[in-house]
Image (spheres, coloured by chain):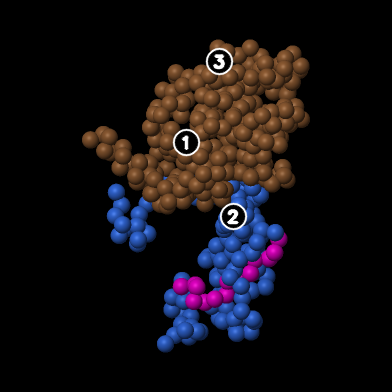
């Protein structure tokens, strides 16, 4: 039995029901969109390639996944920009969206809010461009 | 118009459609409603056996459609409850003997005289399912808290939506095992609702008495037996009639119903 403490810390193994739920979500994305699971991967890497043509992104941290709200699937992209560029882009452009794009062919918007990207902020060599250093 | 035609379907076989149909029909009849159930599973009829009416069949659905008998002649009256009839499927024919138009015509003949027409759909998404869906005013989707059953339920919900008639659809989760859900080894009611995003009509806990009652051909809801499944099915029947049987508090709240049931189980073991 996992304790409540471990659960809160998120360190326990997922239960079989949680595994089933995650697997179901994925398979239903494929079922509902009539897109083979393998094609989903292909699409993800193409999306990344297109975005890379315009902005520098932190490719290792990119997450493109499907989310469901009320029987509708959303393609949600979480794309951290590379530190310096992200900061410039932020300063130049109007506020970016939440990094979500609907499946209906709208291009995903990059999530350009540095405070959301803890991993990037912790990279020491980029401290001098840190926007929120005290 | 009169009757409401409710089609009970699931996509996947073996989730408990026929048993749920039989028990809901009996429960509705016990509430004083006039009920007909139609077995739409031509070639694999079973509603007769679950209801215990298999020895009283003279004619069937295909005989009616092909004009060998009058509709009323094919309807078997269940004498144990006030107003319940079964229109059995043909056992020796295949699904193509009946068309969706036949089903619409047949149910419209019955609508004036009954309150509820329950159609037990066959598993699958082809001809038989199309027949069962064609006359439906409402659809009840039965699923189990298992990945395969939920996946098929999702497919069925999509197909019902694609009909374009905006048929109201609700969900019954059957064979829930409170203990397994508590251990995290079975999808919970909320997990299933998250995935299917369809209104919940009820949750039927797994109950050995269901099998016992099918063995005897006495649907659990016939007499006033209080078993977990019969109670849940009676609640569903009352919800169908429009009664406000609290579903939110009992079944949707995390652990609500299940914790209560689990407590009951433990008490009965001790």
The verdict on residue A108 being magenta is yes
- Count of labels in the image: 3
Question: Which one is in front, B106 or B126?
Answer: B106
Residue B234 tag number: 1
Q: Which residue is mark 3?
A: B54
Of circles 1 and 2, which is in front? 1
Q: Which residue is mark 2?
A: A70
Residue A58 visible at all: yes
What span is colored magenta in the figure? Answer: A105-118
The quarter of the image holding the C terminus of chain A is bottom left
The answer to whether residue B165 is magenta is no
Q: Using the numbered discs, state the Cα–Cα distance from disc 3 to disc 1 in whole angstroms.
A: 24 Å
Give the x, y percent position of residue B103: 72, 29
Q: Are marks 3 and 2 in contact (CB under 8 Å)?
A: no
Q: Residues within 10 Å of mark 2 (few under 14, many from 20)?
A: few
Q: Label 1, label 2: how many angstroms apart (C-alpha)?
A: 29 Å
Q: Is residue A35 visible?
A: no
* In the rendered image, residues at marks 3 and 1 fall on the same chain: yes
Q: Earlier in the sequence, mark 3 or mark 1?
A: 3
């Amino acid at each position: 039995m996992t304790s409540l403490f471990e659960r809160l810390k998120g360190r326990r193994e997922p239960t079989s029901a949680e595994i089933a739920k995650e697997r179901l979500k994925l398979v239903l994305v494929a079922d509902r969109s009539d897109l083979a699971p393998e094609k989903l991967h292909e699409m993800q890497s193409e999306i990344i390639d297109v975005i890379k043509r315009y902005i520098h992104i932190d490719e290792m941290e990119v997450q493109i996944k499907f989310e469901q709200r009320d029987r509708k699937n959303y393609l949600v992209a979480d794309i951290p920009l590379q530190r310096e560029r992200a900061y410039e882009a932020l300063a130049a452009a109007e506020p970016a969206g939440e990094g979500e794009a609907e499946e209906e062919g709208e291009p995903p918007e990059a999530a350009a809010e540095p405070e959301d990207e803890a991993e990037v902020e912790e990279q020491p060599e980029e401290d001098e461009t840190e926007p929120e250093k005290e | 118009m009169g009757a409401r035609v409710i089609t009970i379907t699931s996509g996947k076989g073996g989730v408990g459609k026929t048993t749920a149909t039989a028990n809901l029909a009996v429960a509705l009849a016990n509430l004083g409603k006039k009920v007909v159930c139609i077995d739409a599973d031509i070639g694999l009829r079973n509603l007769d056996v679950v209801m215990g009416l298999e020895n009283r069949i003279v004619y069937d659905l295909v005989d009616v459609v092909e004009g060998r008998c009058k509709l009323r002649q094919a309807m078997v009256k269940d004498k144990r409850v006030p107003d319940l009839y079964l229109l059995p499927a043909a056992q020796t024919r295949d699904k193509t003997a009946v068309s969706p138009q036949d089903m619409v015509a047949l149910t419209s003949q019955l609508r004036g005289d009954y309150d509820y027409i329950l159609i037990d759909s066959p598993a699958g998404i082809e001809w038989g399912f199309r027949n069962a869906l064609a006359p439906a005013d409402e659809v009840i989707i039965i699923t189990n808290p298992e990945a395969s059953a939920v996946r098929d339920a999702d497919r069925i919900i999509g197909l019902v939506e694609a009909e374009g008639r905006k048929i109201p659809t609700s969900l019954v989760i059957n064979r829930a095992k409170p203990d397994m859900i508590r251990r995290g080894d079975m999808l919970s009611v909320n997990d299933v609702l998250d995935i299917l995003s369809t209104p919940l009509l009820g949750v039927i806990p797994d109950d050995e008495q269901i099998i016992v009652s099918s063995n005897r051909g006495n649907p659990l809801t016939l007499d006033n037996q209080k078993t977990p499944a019969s109670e849940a099915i009676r609640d569903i029947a009352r919800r169908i009639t429009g009664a406000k049987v609290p579903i939110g508090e009992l079944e949707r709240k995390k652990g609500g119903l299940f914790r209560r049931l689990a407590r009951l189980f433990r008490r009965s073991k001790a």
